[in-house]
Image: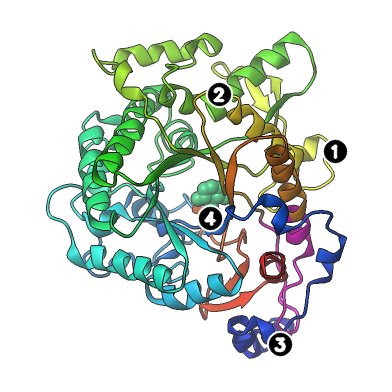
Amino acid sequence: MERRKVLRLFLASSVAAAISPNLVFGKIPFQQHLDFSQLDFGPDFKWGVATSAFQIEGAHDLDGKSASIWDTFSHEKGNIKTGENGDVACDFYHSYEQDLDLLKSLNMTVFRFSISWCRVLPNGTGEPNQKGIDFYHRVIDACLERGLEPWLTLYHWDLPQVLQDQGGWKNRDSLAWFSEYAELVSKNFGDKVKNWMVFNEPSAFTALGYLIGYHAPGLKGFKNFLPTVHHVCLAQAEGGRIIRKNVPTAQIGTTYSCAHVDYYTSEKHDKKSAERWDVLLNRLFIEPALGMGYPTASFPILKKLEAYIKPGDLEKLSFDFDFIGIQNYTREVVKKMGLIPIMKGLEIKPEKRNVQEITSMGWEVYPEGIYQIIKQFAAYPGVKKIIVTENGCAFPDEVITGKIHDLKRIDYYQRYLKQVLRAKQEGVNIGGYFCWTLLDNFEWSEGFYHRFGLVHVDFKTQKRLIKDSGYWFRDFLG
Ligand code: IFM
């Protein structure tokens, strides 16, 4: 108890330091050991951070915003490990100027963020909420005033609850709902925002939310998952077309959570299971977008998607994206598991594999994996450019005399960046790298426990404190 009080005191005295980083640190010594520099990535390479509305904004019911599926889900007992919710989160709704100042001070030039659908269209469709639209204008303007490029994601998982009440993504009408939302957002912000992403990680929000029920809206089973997959794939391409129509000069992408998949042994059955995981994690959403259709041959249960495919749908699944966003954290190692009837495979958790290092999320630190997955995606003929739209790690941080010496995070970033550079130097067109993330925030069903930020947030006081990893980026990019 006593120790916590002392820590709080240190934290309070470090607030000024967080906002004026130059007063606190010289160069972070770690940088001296690097055998590459920012210059190796080229002068046009984009450096930034990625964020999402629900995880940082708070203001859950302010200025006309309605509830999203994550408001509902996080308020239901038992869904969030820590019992927390996103009502306040990082209060970015009120502190965006200070937070963008912090970002700028780290010498980053890109702020990737998402729009909360229920802030701008509280009924899901129909009457827009001007106060919500005005908020995003303020955020975008604040970026532009600071010389930061706003990169806008249309959908990062927070579907309006009113639409979930009508079946959410399971309902084919979701395509029309999403199209209306995409029209509204692209028409409103298209004159200021030049870089757009349709979805954040469709394999994650469909599988976690509609197959295993670990995320909102908490649905389970293939009967929920399969229609959701098809409607999301249609919306992915349609979203691209709508942005192209309203913002002809935009760079349009979409992002995928992806991971290199290894098999546990080279036995045939382990390889087969690994192949199915690869379909689910890496191939299910990009291949239809590239005009390749669904990867049913490698995962026969996907043939059941046919029940939801209407005449003319297959031609509408593709869109010529300008870039593909890669979001990678770790790798997967898969073993056959007869007891799991559909996947017939199970990821072998890092702690059961004698892995050297895991993050607080339990994810193996495996830098080569980002190189492998970039190469896998770059091998598709239709992929023109790759942006690493998320990469990062959570470790328990300790505030010691107003500082956070998060050396493990620095080491992680350096080793992953080296692998990104390796792929780039082998000729992959990689245009940027965004850290996940600027601020410690609401890590979905895990609550606030896992800290991914370059900037520490004290969720009681909302005080920000730049971690050494943030200073490391400042110096690396400076
Ligand atoms: O926090 C998430 C983010 O919303 C999507 N990509 C992975 C991050 C870390 O789990």
Residue at the limit of the structure toward the left, as seen here: 127
**Structural crowding at the residue carrying mark 1, measured as other residues with C-alpha within 10 Å and reported as few (<14), some (14–19) or many (≥20):** few
Dots 2, 4 in contact, CB < 8 A: no
Residue at the limit of the structure toward the front, as seen here: 43
- Up-down: is 239 above or below 472? above
What's the amino acid at mark 4? Glu
What's the amino acid at mark 2? Tyr
What's the amino acid at mark 3? Val
Dots 4, 1 in contact, CB < 8 A: no
406 inside magenta stretch: yes
Q: Residue at x 84, y 54 (%)?
A: 35
Give whichever of discs 3 and 1 has the lower sequence position.
3
The N terminus sits in image quarter:
bottom right
Give whichever of discs 4 and 1 has the lower sequence position.
1
Mark yes or no: residue 435 visible.
Answer: no
Q: How far apart are marks 4 and 1 (CA)?
A: 26 Å
The stretch of residues the image draws in magenta is 394-413
Give whichever of discs 3 and 2 has the lower sequence position.
3
Q: How far apart are marks 4 and 3 (CA)?
A: 27 Å
Mark 3, residue position: 6
Residue 269 position in % (x across, y down): 71, 11
Q: Which residue is drawn at 70% across and 57% down?
A: 39
Mark 1, residue position: 354
Label 1 sits on a secondary structure element that is: loop
Label 3 sits on a secondary structure element that is: helix
Does mark 2 have its CB less than 8 Å from ligand 1?
Answer: no
Q: How many marks?
A: 4
Mark 4, residue position: 443
Does mark 4 have its CB less than 8 Å from ligand 1?
Answer: yes
Mark 2, residue position: 380
- Up-down: is 158 above or below 450? above
